[in-house]
Image (tube, helix red, strand yellow):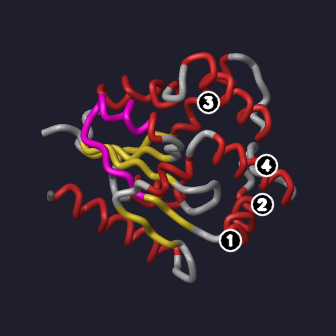
Amino acid sequence: MAKLIVCLTGMPGSGKSTIVSALKARGLEALNLGDGVRAEAKRRNIEPTGDNLGKLMLELREKNGPGAIAELLIEPIKNSQSKVIIIDGVRSTTEIEVLKNAGSVKLLSIEATADTRYKFLSSRGRSDDPATREKFEERDNRELGVGIGESIAIADETIVNSDITLDELTERAYKVIEKWIDT
C-alpha cells in the first residue's frame, strides 16, 4: 500500500502546527515545509526572520520552480517507515503534485478568521511570526501570491477552527485522517 500523505493547508495561524503537535503525540510522523526553508536559511547563515524566510522561499521557488520546497521532503518521506505522514504547510497545487510522487495525497484545510490567526501568531513566539498587523497582512499576501488560496479551495476536507477547543480541533483532524486510512 502507498504511503498516505496528509497535507495540511491553511493561512498562517489557522491551527496547522497545533494539529501537527497533537498528531505527533499520537504517534504519527510529521514533516513541515517551512522546516525545509528554515534549514536552507541555516545553511546559508541567514537570520530566520519572517521577512528573510519569506524572501528565501520565493527565491527557491523562482530558481527551482513552484514545487521546490516540496521537493525537499521527497527523500525524507520515501525513507520513512511510517505508513501515514503529515505534511504541515502545503501552499500550492504544484507542491501537492510533487508530493504525489511519494505516496497517496489527501488535503486537509484548516480555516480561521484573520483576527483569530493574528492573535495566535502574535503570541506564538516563533522567529518568523509577524510583530504588527501590517506584517501579518504582508505575510498573508505573500502566501496568497504563491497559491495557498487554490490549495485551500481544492481540499478534500475542511475544518473550521472557530469557537472550538484545541482538543476538539485536534480530535476532528484525527477523525478525518482515520477515515482516510480506512478507505
Q: Spot the residue most to the bottom.
A: 163
Of the residues under marks 1 and 4, which one precedes in the sequence? 1
Of the residues under marks 1 and 3, which one precedes in the sequence? 3
What residue appears at the point 78 percent right and 55 percent down from the top-left corner?
137
Q: Mark 2 points at which residue?
A: 122
- Tell which tag, 1 or 2, sits nearer the viewer: 1
Per the rendering, the mark at residue 105 is: none
Q: Mark 1 belongs to which amino acid?
A: Thr
Query: Is residue 83 positioned above or below 26 on the image?
Result: above
Per the rendering, the mark at residue 138 is: 4
Query: Is residue 115 positioned above or below 177 on the image?
Result: below
Q: Mark 3 points at which residue?
A: 37
Cα separation, mark 1 vs mark 3, equals 25 Å
Judging depth in this view, the residue of 152 and 173 nearest the camera is 152
User: Residue 177 appears in which quarter of the rendering?
Assistant: bottom left
**Residue bounds of the magenta highlight:** 95-108
- Image-based side of 125 in relation to 80, left or right: right
Of the residues under marks 2 and 3, which one precedes in the sequence? 3
